Image: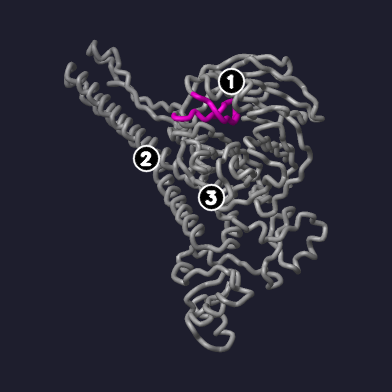
């Protein structure tokens, strides 16, 4: 970064002092009004993004101080070494001769602000902030319960005290003193925890503000280089919460009092009015904890994007079916197809020969592999979902769902399915309990898939694809009838790229994880004719696409 971003770097090189009005992160210098204009039309810099100096100054100090130039060789970072998890300039490469995973840094920082890694960091910060809030609320509640219990005990003590003579005045006084001391001692402990939680809450709030500012104003490279520092801060916050929950500091503290039975005898042998005791019970706070992230966060950055994605046709299959509404890739290279018109499920072996077919089980719409050598088949019209045994080639059981059920996806022991006017619903395959995911009315031919905490579903009537979180909150919606009309089958790869078939555009389109960009992968020129469904196998990187009748295509995705 330039030593003085308030001055125009170009003018400064000509020994002229001009105030900068914008900052170019790629050039690493500020630009005045005149130089800004030349910069925007010059062939070498016309695509550089600039930000006003006023906005640039709003970035946190630690981001402004992030070095974009190699300190050893004073050259710009151009590569990233996966093995050593570090950035490199051209001269640094000499010390990485044995490293096979040197990658152009521009590939890593491209779309970094919309990457799943950045999303995970944002969500984790929100999670840590929520956990701090929960811990604070818990401690405040314990403070209130202690005070309430103290008042209850005082009432009991005083009611007992009125029944005895003045001989017990001193004992009463001693007991109340003991009660006050115990309450004050425990309250001080809790207040100490609250103080540390409030301090940690302010730190997390600052991180949230920094992330929001970075996401809006920082350069891609600045964002990339500072993400690990943010993750360390998050790790400290998570360790802080963990230490609080495991050290006994969040145990529920109670005060109780047992009035001495001998008080009723009113004899000189009574030496104490009662006894104050303090107990601590483990209290389950249900701390939120995201799935364990990989030790090296950079590994989670997308290495395949829609621009460099390629499909290689491996097989063209003849399903000998009409009105295909579902397909899936099975273990061992097998493939299953559902024929809605003839209520039939057909399974092919990897060599394209027929494994088996099953019919007379009612309507068959979508087909989904659910593990345990079984597939789930939605019915579309009837209010049931069938489970089929792949080894025995028989119907294992039928589950009543009391709604239409169209496209479906399997996730963690549950089947999420499109229920038309009832939106997205989820059924547990173990106890068959059903919960609503969204209440948004879906089209009659809707399909759904999932990636992490996100859900993606199609609407063929409105020609759009929607992404929402697990609570149904819409994150983005893609709609571009120039490339995608009548979207039906949908699936996602390991990097969050979304594959969709276009019934009316006779193509397969891939949408970026943030829903901002799209690209056609195959079309009618490749044999697609009224394509209905597709399925991406994340373990083999194979994509199966099925036309409404007869033809299906198996692609390798690279």
Is residue 19 placed above or below 413 in the rendered structure? Answer: below
Of callouts 1 and 3, the N-terminal one: 1
Return the residue nearer the eye: 304 or 17. 304
Q: Residue at x 56, y 55 (%)?
A: 113
Q: Find residue 294 and report its image quarter.
A: top right
Check disc 2: other Cα within 10 Å, few if <14, some if 14-19, many if 20+. few
Marks 1/2 in contact by CB < 8 Å: the verdict is no
Q: Find residue 334 and report its image quarter.
A: top right
Which residue matches tag 2?
188
Q: Which mark is residue 314?
A: none
In the current view of this chain or complex, which residue is farthest to the bottom?
A: 15
Check disc 3: other Cα within 10 Å, few if <14, some if 14-19, many if 20+. few
Return the residue nearer the eye: 226 or 182. 226
In the current view of this chain or complex, which residue is farthest to the top?
A: 265
Return the residue nearer the eye: 138 or 544. 544
Task: Tell me the CA gap for discs 3 and 2.
Answer: 61 Å
Q: Is residue 323 visible?
A: yes
Task: Say which element carries label 2.
Answer: helix
Of callouts 1 and 2, the N-terminal one: 2
Q: Which mark is residue 480?
A: 3
Residue 125, given in percent of the width and then of the height, sits at 50, 47
Task: Say which element carries label 3.
Answer: loop
Which residue matches tag 1?
363
Q: Is residue 73 left or right of residue 467?
A: right
Residue 387, given in percent of the width and then of the height, sits at 62, 19
Task: Tell me the CA gap for discs 1 and 2.
Answer: 67 Å
Q: Which residues are magenta?
A: 404-421
Task: Tell me the CA gap for discs 1 and 3.
Answer: 32 Å
Q: Nearer the viewer, mark 3 or mark 2?
A: 3
């Amino acid at each position: 970064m330039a030593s003085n971003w308030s001055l125009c770097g170009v003018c400064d090189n000509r020994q002229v002092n001009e105030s900068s009005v914008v900052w170019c992160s790629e050039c690493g210098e500020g630009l005045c009004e005149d130089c800004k204009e030349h910069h925007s039309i010059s062939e070498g810099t016309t695509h550089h993004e600039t930000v006003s100096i006023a906005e640039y100054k709003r970035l946190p100090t630690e981001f402004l101080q992030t070095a974009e130039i190699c300190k050893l060789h004073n050259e710009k970072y151009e590569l990233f070494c996966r093995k050593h998890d570090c950035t490199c300039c051209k001269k640094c490469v000499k010390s990485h001769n044995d490293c096979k995973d040197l990658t152009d840094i521009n590939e890593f920082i491209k779309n970094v602000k919309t990457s799943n890694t950045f999303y995970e960091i944002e969500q984790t910060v929100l999670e840590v902030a929520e956990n701090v809030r929960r811990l604070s609320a818990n401690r405040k509640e314990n403070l209130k319960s202690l005070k309430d219990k103290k008042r209850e005990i005082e009432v009991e003590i005083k009611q007992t005290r009125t029944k005895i003579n003045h001989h017990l005045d001193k004992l009463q006084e001693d007991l109340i003193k003991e009660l006050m001391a115990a309450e004050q001692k425990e309250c001080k402990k809790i207040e100490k925890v609250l103080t540390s939680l409030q301090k940690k809450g302010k730190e997390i709030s600052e991180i949230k503000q920094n992330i929001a500012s970075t996401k809006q104003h920082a350069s891609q490279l600045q964002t990339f280089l500072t993400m690990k520092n943010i993750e360390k801060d998050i790790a400290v916050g998570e360790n802080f919460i963990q230490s609080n929950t495991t050290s006994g500091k969040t145990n529920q503290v109670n005060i109780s009092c047992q009035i001495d039975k001998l008080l009723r005898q009113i004899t000189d042998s009574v030496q104490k009015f009662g006894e104050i005791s303090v107990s601590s019970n483990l209290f389950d706070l249900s701390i939120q904890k995201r799935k364990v992230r990989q030790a090296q966060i950079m590994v989670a950055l997308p290495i395949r994007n829609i621009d460099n994605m390629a499909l290689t046709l491996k097989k063209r299959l003849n399903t000998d079916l009409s009105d295909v509404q579902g397909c899936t890739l099975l273990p061992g290279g097998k493939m299953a197809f559902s024929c809605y018109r003839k209520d039939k499920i057909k399974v092919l072996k990897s060599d394209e020969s027929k494994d088996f077919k099953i019919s007379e089980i009612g309507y068959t719409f979508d087909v989904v592999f659910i593990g345990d050598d079984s597939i789930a088949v939605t019915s579309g019209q009837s209010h049931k979902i069938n489970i089929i045994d792949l080894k025995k080639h028989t119907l294992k059981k039928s589950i009543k769902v009391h709604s239409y059920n169209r496209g479906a996806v399997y996730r963690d022991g549950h089947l999420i399915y499109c229920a038309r006017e009832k939106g997205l619903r989820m059924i547990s395959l173990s106890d068959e309990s059903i919960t609503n995911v969204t209440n948004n009315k879906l089209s009659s031919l809707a399909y759904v898939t999932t990636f992490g905490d996100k859900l993606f579903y199609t609407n063929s009537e409105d020609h759009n694809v929607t992404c929402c979180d697990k609570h149904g909150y819409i994150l983005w919606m893609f709609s571009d009838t120039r490339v995608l009309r009548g979207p039906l089958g949908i699936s996602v790869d390991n990097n969050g790229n979304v594959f969709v078939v276009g019934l009316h555009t006779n193509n397969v389109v891939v949408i970026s994880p943030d829903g901002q960009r799209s690209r056609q992968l195959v079309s009618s020129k490749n044999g697609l004719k009224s394509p209905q469904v597709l399925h991406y196998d994340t373990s083999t990187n194979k994509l199966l696409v099925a036309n409404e009748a007869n033809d299906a295509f198996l692609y390798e995705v690279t």
